[in-house]
Amino acid sequence: MSKRPLAGLLGIFLAAMMAGLNNRVGALALADVRGALGFGLDDASWLVTAYSAGELIAMPFSAWFAITLSVRRFELWMLGTCTGLAVILPFLHNLDLLLALRFVQGVAGGTMIPLLMMAALKFLPPPVRLHGLALYAMTATFAPNLSLWLAGHWTDGLFDWRWVYWQSVPLAIAAGVLMGWGLPREPVQTGRFREANWFGMACGVPALGLIAIALDQGTRLDWFHSPLITLSLAAGLALLAVYLLTEWYHPSPFIKLQILGRRNLALGFILFVCLLVVLMSGSLLPASALGPLQGYRPRQMAPIGLTVALPQLVLGPVVALLLYQRWADARIVLASGLSLIALACLSGAQLTAEWNRDQFIVVQALHALGQPMAVVAMLFLATSVVQPHEGPYVSGTVNTLRAFGSLLGAAVVGQLMTLRSRFHAEMLLDHAARAGNALPVLPEPSQLTGIVGQQALVLSVADAYRVLGILALLLIPLALRLAYVPAPASSLSSSSQG
């Protein structure tokens, strides 16, 4: 490939990384943002939901709009929108306006990650395509774990919460320059507007938004005890069914559901969603434990995230090179990655109230090794049955599932910890009541409540680790059922043969 297309792809990668960091850093630094702006906990939680909903809504449709308007034009518009909003958001103090603009920023940011996969599948030849997929995998392995360090750096290093939003500006400028120079100028394909499934889109947009609201706010509002969550989930699933039905029969769909008839795509997509749930054990659980137990701020927890994030810069390309070897079986690489992640979870399940970040190093190191093996190998196995012209359909589907899987994972882990924490608290109080008569000195009620709350949290996090570790093990047989895909010819071997 020449320099200009590679520069364009690098720009798309930087834009995708920026979009991933926008969401995660904003969520991690939410306490500082709401403190600076004077919002309550419940009201401020909607800032994360608004961005997540916008991101999920954009993903199935972004590839279609990029092809119709041209990748260069569409990416630069979305990048400009996302960056312009990032500049002005810290100066706004009206919650309703903030929510609306954060939603728009989520829509703009949500278009960028699918285009990275689309570009890798559509434009990269097989000898280098795996390296493109490795770049895409970093949006799921590198960005979420780097976010912890960034959130701590802005709030506790610079002591300026506004950089939670402004951080995207330097990356966006670099991405814009690279895309502006590297991507080709193409005309707008106006004829595609007459062919699109607009009725389906009219159903799909509110469907995905309502589902995002239900998943993101469900744990806080106690799920079906909340009329809002019940209505959002019921209406969202009903509209989603209509959207998928129209997509199935429409001659020019946004996502082509018929490709799911291919074994590796169907099984691969199921694996991908489950894997995203499991990956919550690497980013969400350590922070859930160290924050309340040790009083850690994001900056103090940063080494936990960096232990996973930094090795991805090397391990992603290394796994791609491994998959180019003729003797390598991607299914074994995927199963090995899942085994390492399961081992990390089962190690994390040994958590005690005395653990600090040093005790998490081994757990996170196992994640650092397992995550790129699992994600890159899974993407290779699933997308190898896809033709280049089908790249836009697959990228829209994969990235919708990616956003959905992340929301589902946070909801599952949050609800699991809530339920197990209540259970353990009741059991511990029951034991304390039984043992109370045998103790010479009874602790004060407030002291007892603190001890019980701490131990209940420890046990609930340990339970979450166990559940996610078992899920990772259960995925191994599913991974081995994927059809074998031989290694593609690498650029080195191709040139030697030529």
Image (cartoon, rainbow, N blue to C red):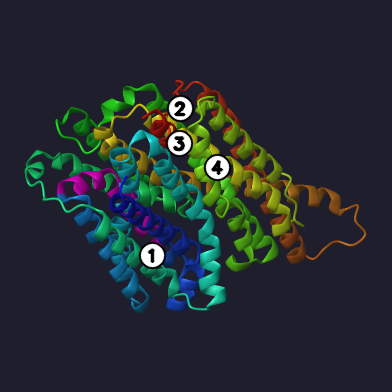
In 3D space, how far apart are the residues under numbered discs 2 and 3 (Cα atoms)?
Answer: 21 Å
Q: Label 3 belongs to which residue?
A: 272
Q: Quadrant of residue 148?
A: bottom right
Q: Position of residue 377 (x, y in %)?
A: 49, 34
Q: Quadrant of the N terminus?
A: top left
Residue at 46 percent across and 70 percent down: it is 40
Secondary structure category for the residue under label 4: helix
In 3D space, how far apart are the residues under numbered discs 3 and 1 (Cα atoms)?
Answer: 28 Å
In 3D space, how far apart are the residues under numbered discs 4 and 1 (Cα atoms)?
Answer: 25 Å
Marks 2 and 3: CB-CB under 8 Å? no
Q: Label 4 belongs to which residue?
A: 371
Residue at 30 percent across and 42 percent down: it is 118
Marks 3 and 4: CB-CB under 8 Å? no
Q: Position of residue 318 (x, y in %)?
A: 53, 42
Task: Specify few, some or many for label 2: CA neighbours under 10 Å numbering under 14, 14-19, or 20 or more.
Answer: many
Q: Which mark is residue 487?
A: 2
What residue type is disc 1 on? Answer: Leu
